[in-house]
Amino acid sequence: MQKLLPFLIVFHLSGYRTLKYFYINYVQRYLASYFPQTVSYNRFVELQKKALLPMVILLKTLRLGQDTGISFVDSTPIRVCRNKRIFNHKVFKGVATRGKSTMGYFFGFKLHIVVNDKGKILNFVITPGNVDDRDPLKAPNFLKNIFGKLFADKGYVSKKLFEILFVDGIKLITGLRNNMKNQLMSLSDKTMLRKRSIIETINDELKNICQVEHSQHRSFANFLTNMISGLLAYSFLPKKPRIKYETVNTYGLSIC
């Protein structure tokens, strides 16, 4: 068990695109002196699901960031196969669903994350692909330790959701849709809403650097293991996207 965790985390930071090539050509070749009793690759795949619970505990207790009063929320699709192979896909049959994002339709899941202005993940949740982006925000545990201002895109516009979060001490700030009336917004909130691209950058790093998305899963347990180890790998990145700003009070105005 102690060997599984570092292997899974290092894989997502190594630059290798496949776990098999990483394990056979790197771990068993160059790390054999440090780990002389490594198991075969097939056995390693069978054992990696046992590391799921320890990784979740490690991520939830030690590797999540702390809220600073400014946070961003967004979801990103996690595709498990190409659209033309949906009817032949068997691994996630009955679990994954069809969903729609700004890039079109997909088959798989959604990863919902909340991050702070320093680029650290505050919380996350994995849902089927057809779940509305606003539904996880209504769950009490997802935003349990979040306070202050929460910035989101136009897909999170909801009067009922705004009232629910406002009672919990969270001010939901979103962009306006084309059919909505213009509303007054402070200069600092308007500026920070434009910086919402930070969470888009984090989603891009999770997929292209930490490899939380690929279509080679053979079981749902290994899918979750790959997802959690990818999120753990992101928490160890030395340089994360962040927002640099200074607040200056001038005649009662707060300017970022």
Image (spheres, rainbow, N blue to C red):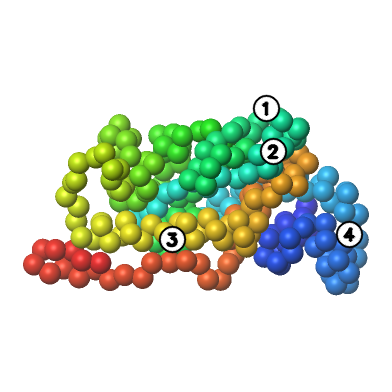
Residue 96 in picture, x, y percent from top left: 64, 34
Name the residue that disc number 2 marks: 84
SS assignment at label 4: loop
Name the residue that disc number 1 marks: 94
Front label number (3 vs 2) = 2
Name the residue that disc number 4 marks: 38
The residue type indicated by label 1 comes to: Gly
Q: Quadrant of residue 190?
A: bottom left
Residue 3 in picture, x, y percent from top left: 78, 58
Name the residue that disc number 3 marks: 198
Question: What residue sits 56% from the left and 39% below the top?
Answer: 105
Is residue 141 or residue 220 the one in the foreground? 220
SS assignment at label 3: helix
Front label number (1 vs 2) = 2
Is residue 173 or residue 106 the one in the foreground? 106
Q: Earlier in the sequence, mark 4 or mark 1?
A: 4
The residue type indicated by label 3 comes to: Ile
Front label number (4 vs 3) = 3
The residue type indicated by label 2 comes to: Lys
Do the numbered discs 3 and 1 sit on residues whose CB atoms are within 8 Å?
Answer: no
Q: Earlier in the sequence, mark 3 or mark 2?
A: 2
Q: Earlier in the sequence, mark 1 or mark 2?
A: 2
| Structural distance between the alpha carbons of marks 3 and 2 | 32 Å
- Looking at the image, which residue sits at the far left? 251
